[in-house]
């Protein structure tokens, strides 16, 4: 059964602590934190202080997704704030091995993400080194976008490679996932489903999370 990671990008920021506690009580497995810098993507969101506030509000793992340039400059800050997983973008780093080593040194689990236009072969060699590989199913930068099916063959390829290599790497998908299309990504072999507006825009968080987890 897949893990469900509600993205706080779609939460009510005026009630962020309450929102996080609500999805935890509703059965969420992780909290996904989208960090944007206005350079790598055309939007600005949150920094380490917000991660620290989330750490105080929940016992769930914090899945911090850095959609930023020069992520190495900020790894220690996010790790110190309470991140459990830190994911950097393949497109934003020159040396993934070095990035993973730095994240490990900070005491977090390393992940790598790829945009819809990036070939999966750029990260498939890291199926054993990465704790997490995130396939974006929208162009990063804003929430509430439409799911892009180009993610499905990438997920299927990585799922097959993971099985062959007997890797413990988790496959994650983020972008446009709803209750009516989540079965497609689950069937492709996803381990972690990020859902923002699908959860926080629903009237019943528990019912939505349960429906997404059992959709396959």
Image (tube, rainbow, N blue to C red):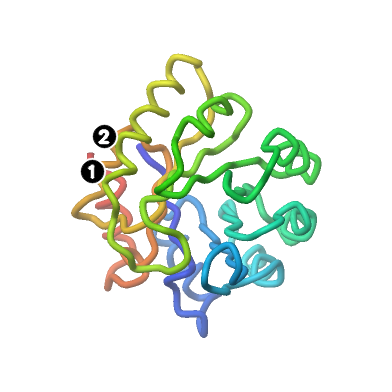
Q: Is residue 95 left or right of residue 136?
A: right
The residue depicted at 36 percent of the width and 51 percent of the height is 137
Query: Which quadrant: the N terminus?
Result: top left
Whether tag 1 and tag 2 are in contact, CB under 8 A, the answer is: yes
Single out the residue that lies furthest toward the bottom: 14
The residue depicted at 50 percent of the width and 16 percent of the height is 165
Residue ID for mark 1:
183
Residue 61: image x %, image y %?
Answer: 58, 51
Q: Is residue 164 left or right of residue 73?
A: left
Residue 109: image x %, image y %?
Answer: 66, 41
Single out the residue that lies furthest toward the left: 180
Query: Which quadrant: the C terminus?
Result: top left
Q: Which mark is residue 187?
A: 2
Q: Label 2: state its secondary structure.
A: helix
Within 10 Å of disc 1 (Cα), the crowding (few <14, some 14-19, many 20+) is some
Query: Which of these two is toward me, 154 or 53?
Result: 154
Query: Cα distance, mark 1 to mark 2?
Result: 6 Å
Q: Note whether 24 is above or below 42 in the view shown.
A: above
Where residue 205 sits, quadrant-wise, is bottom left
Residue 40: image x %, image y %?
Answer: 58, 62
The residue depicted at 70 percent of the width and 44 percent of the height is 108
Within 10 Å of disc 2 (Cα), the crowding (few <14, some 14-19, many 20+) is few
Query: Which of these two is toward me, 6 or 38?
Result: 38
Q: Label 1: state its secondary structure.
A: helix
The residue depicted at 43 percent of the width and 64 percent of the height is 23
Q: Is residue 179 left or right of residue 174?
A: left
């Amino acid at each position: 059964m897949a893990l469900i990671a509600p993205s706080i990008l779609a939460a009510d920021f005026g009630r962020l602590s309450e929102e996080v506690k609500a999805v935890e009580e509703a059965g969420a497995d992780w909290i996904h934190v989208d960090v944007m810098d206005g350079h790598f993507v055309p939007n600005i969101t949150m920094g380490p202080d917000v991660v620290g506030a989330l750490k105080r509000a929940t016992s769930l793992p914090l899945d911090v997704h850095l959609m930023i340039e020069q992520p190495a400059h900020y790894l220690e800050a996010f790790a110190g704030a309470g991140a459990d997983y830190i994911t950097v973008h393949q497109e934003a780093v020159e040396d993934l091995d070095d990035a993973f080593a730095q994240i490990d040194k900070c005491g977090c689990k390393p992940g790598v993400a790829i945009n819809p236009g990036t070939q999966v072969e750029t990260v498939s060699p890291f199926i054993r080194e990465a704790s997490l590989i995130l396939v974006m199913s929208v162009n990063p930068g804003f929430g509430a976008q439409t799911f892009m099916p180009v993610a499905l063959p990438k997920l299927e390829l990585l799922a097959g490679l993971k099985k062959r290599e007997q890797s413990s790497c988790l496959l994650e998908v983020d972008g446009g996932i709803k209750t009516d299309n989540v079965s497609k990504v689950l069937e492709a072999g996803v381990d972690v489903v990020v859902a923002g507006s699908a959860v926080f825009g629903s009237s019943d968080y528990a019912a939505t999370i349960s429906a997404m987890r059992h959709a396959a």
